[in-house]
């Protein structure tokens, strides 16, 4: 990805200023099951959703001609089968004859339209289900009967519908079951206003005695004030359908109760797992100075050399030692477990260009680039190297995001993972290496006389006292300083 593309992404992400304290605060709901990978609203999709780590599933339900509750999104079967039957005018037996899996590939041949009973039977002990009613209130008596014989607590069930009368009827007949009104929004072409308005939404929720709102994730509407007003009325807040991890990050920051997605595992993998600010040990934004922006005040210092400068970076400015043979020294000891992340823009490749090293030893805790554009990291001089082949020409003078995490695995060893541009390097798989206690100084661009100084520009150096996962690293890469800002109270 070029700097221009990265910058465009960053502009889109500008509204994601802080990170919520815990990923567990929000449920990830699999939209129609794992519908990005399997035929929607089938048992295959729901089972796959649980395998993919979803906290809950969402399915669409109609009442058939003979009073059975069946799982399908559209009013007809045309989109998902070779026949065009109207669901409400067809019996369960007629609907079950259809193959609703083959359209997604031969691996799903033979999938049938499931009943609500069958879908409920897929829900694990602590799983939850969102039952979206696509027809009218006539389904409620049958729904009450099915849920009455379900084998798990009613707290694991929520009914959702765009039809406000369905929600009202569910709340009237089954007050122990959560029922959330679904809404999307349309913008008036002349006034530019969104409808329904916030006031109209709140009025509807009150009138139908809904348990909460399941809203389209329109960030022009779903903001902190809107969520706070819903909370003040003791209403739950759920959002659909989100496949962008950075939009999900914003919604997580707003504190919504659930996020519905087509890709539960992928979205979870690309969301930060912790409050990054709480684990920040050092942050050098390198915006015209070497001050530490964390609470630790580990400010950097230029070492020998002159002619150092600050130039345009990924986030604001960047430090550029140039040909001065200077480096940046920070009086900080790397933790026993942790993560180091930074942006680097190499100048013309040359042998043994140091990105960082450490005062503990000339061959310990160092990262460098060989003349053939091979990136290397070594924690212990007597241990293995982690290497990754950069593009020999394409990455010259372009920004690269690099991160290393290390985790204590016992026996005085650490599991080391190298990330390049937000991805764990497949060329350098996680491996256990001997532990070497870091020294009291960390050097950006190299501090040992035997190591050639790095002719790179550096931006946004962060060190954490915790091994981070891919979602954390990608958040740091995308949001930069915003990923570790103190949360507003």
Image (tube, grey):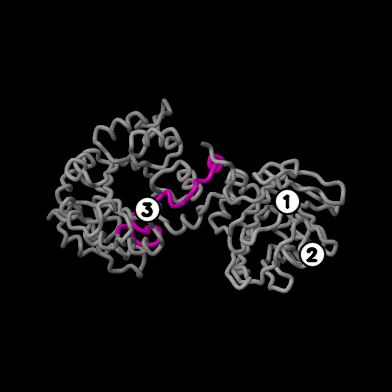
* Depth order, front residue of 95/20: 20
| In the image, residue 44 lies in the stretch drawn in magenta | no
Q: How many marks?
A: 3
* Depth order, front residue of 439/387: 439
Q: Quadrant of residue 355?
A: bottom right
Disc 1 or 2, which lies upstream in sequence?
A: 2
The CA distance from mark 1 to mark 2 is 17 Å
Where is residue 378 drawn, in percent x and y? 70, 67
Where is residue 487 drawn, in percent x and y? 54, 40
Q: For numbered disc 3, what is the local secondary structure?
A: strand
Give the residues drawn in magenta, as a range: 12-41
Question: Mark 2, residues whose alpha carbon is within 10 Å: few (<14), some, or many (≥20)?
Answer: many
Question: Mark 3, residues whose alpha carbon is within 10 Å: few (<14), some, or many (≥20)?
Answer: many
Q: Is residue 10 visible?
A: no
Q: Determine whether, in the image, residue 406 is placed left or right of residue 192.
A: right
Where is residue 321 drawn, in percent x and y? 81, 50
Which residue is painted at 55% across and 54% down in the image? 472
* Depth order, front residue of 397/486: 486
Q: Quadrant of residue 237?
A: top left
* Cβ atoms at labels 3 and 1 below 8 Å apart: no
* Cβ atoms at labels 3 and 2 below 8 Å apart: no
Residue occupied by mark 3 = 29
| In the image, residue 28 lies in the stretch drawn in magenta | yes
Which residue is painted at 27% across and 33% down in the image? 206
Question: Mark 1, residues whose alpha carbon is within 10 Å: few (<14), some, or many (≥20)?
Answer: many
Where is residue 419 drawn, in percent x and y? 62, 61
Disc 3 or 2, which lies upstream in sequence?
A: 3
Find residue 45 and name its label.
Answer: none
Residue occupied by mark 2 = 352
Residue occupied by mark 1 = 458
Q: Determine whether, in the image, residue 241 is placed left or right of residue 370.
A: left
């Amino acid at each position: 990805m070029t700097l221009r593309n990265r910058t465009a992404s960053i502009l889109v992400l500008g509204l994601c200023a802080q990170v919520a304290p815990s990923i567990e605060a929000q449920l990830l709901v699999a939209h129609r099951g794992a519908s990005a990978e399997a035929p929607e609203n089938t048992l295959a999709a729901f089972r796959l959703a649980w395998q993919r780590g979803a906290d809950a599933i969402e399915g669409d339900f109609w009442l058939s001609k003979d009073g059975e509750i069946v799982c399908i999104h559209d009013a007809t079967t045309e989109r998902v089968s070779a026949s065009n039957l109207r669901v409400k005018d067809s019996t369960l037996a007629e609907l079950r004859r259809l193959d609703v899996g083959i359209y997604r590939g031969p691996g799903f041949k033979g999938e049938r339209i499931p009943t609500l009973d069958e879908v409920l039977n897929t829900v694990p002990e602590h799983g939850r289900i969102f039952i979206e009613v696509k027809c009218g209130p006539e389904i409620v008596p049958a729904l009450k009967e099915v849920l009455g014989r379900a084998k798990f607590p009613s707290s694991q069930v929520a009914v959702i519908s765009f039809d406000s009368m369905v929600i009202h009827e569910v709340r009237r007949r089954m007050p122990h079951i959560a029922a959330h009104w679904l809404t999307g929004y349309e913008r008036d072409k002349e006034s530019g206003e969104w409808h329904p308005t916030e006031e109209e939404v709140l009025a509807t929720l009150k009138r139908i005695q809904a348990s909460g709102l399941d809203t389209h994730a329109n960030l022009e509407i779903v903001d902190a004030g809107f969520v706070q007003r819903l909370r003040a009325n003791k209403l739950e807040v759920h959002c659909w359908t989100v496949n962008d991890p950075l939009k999900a990050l914003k919604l997580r920051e707003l504190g919504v109760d659930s996020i519905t997605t087509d890709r539960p595992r992928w979205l979870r993998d690309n969301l930060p797992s912790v409050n990054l600010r709480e684990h920040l040990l050092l942050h050098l934004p390198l915006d015209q100075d070497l001050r530490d922006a964390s609470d630790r005040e580990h400010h950097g210092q230029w070492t020998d050399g002159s002619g150092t400068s600050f130039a345009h970076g990924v986030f604001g400015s960047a430090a550029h030692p140039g040909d001065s043979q200077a480096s940046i020294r920070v009086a900080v000891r790397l933790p026993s477990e942790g993560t180091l992340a930074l942006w680097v823009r190499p100048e013309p490749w040359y042998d043994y260009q140091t990105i960082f090293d450490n005062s503990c030893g000339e061959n310990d805790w160092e990262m460098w680039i060989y003349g053939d554009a091979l990136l290397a990291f070594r924690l212990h001089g007597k241990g293995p190297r982690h290497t990754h082949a950069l593009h020999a020409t394409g990455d010259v003078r372009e920004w690269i995001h690099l991160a290393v995490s290390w985790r204590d695995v016992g026996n005085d060893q650490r599991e080391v993972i190298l990330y390049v541009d937000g991805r764990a390097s497949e060329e350098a798989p996680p491996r256990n290496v001997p532990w070497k206690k870091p020294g009291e100084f960390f050097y950006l661009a190299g501090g040992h006389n035997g190591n050639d100084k790095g002719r790179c520009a550096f931006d946004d150096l962060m060190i954490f006292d915790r091994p981070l996962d891919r979602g954390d690293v990608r958040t740091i890469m995308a949001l930069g300083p915003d990923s570790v800002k103190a949360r507003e109270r």
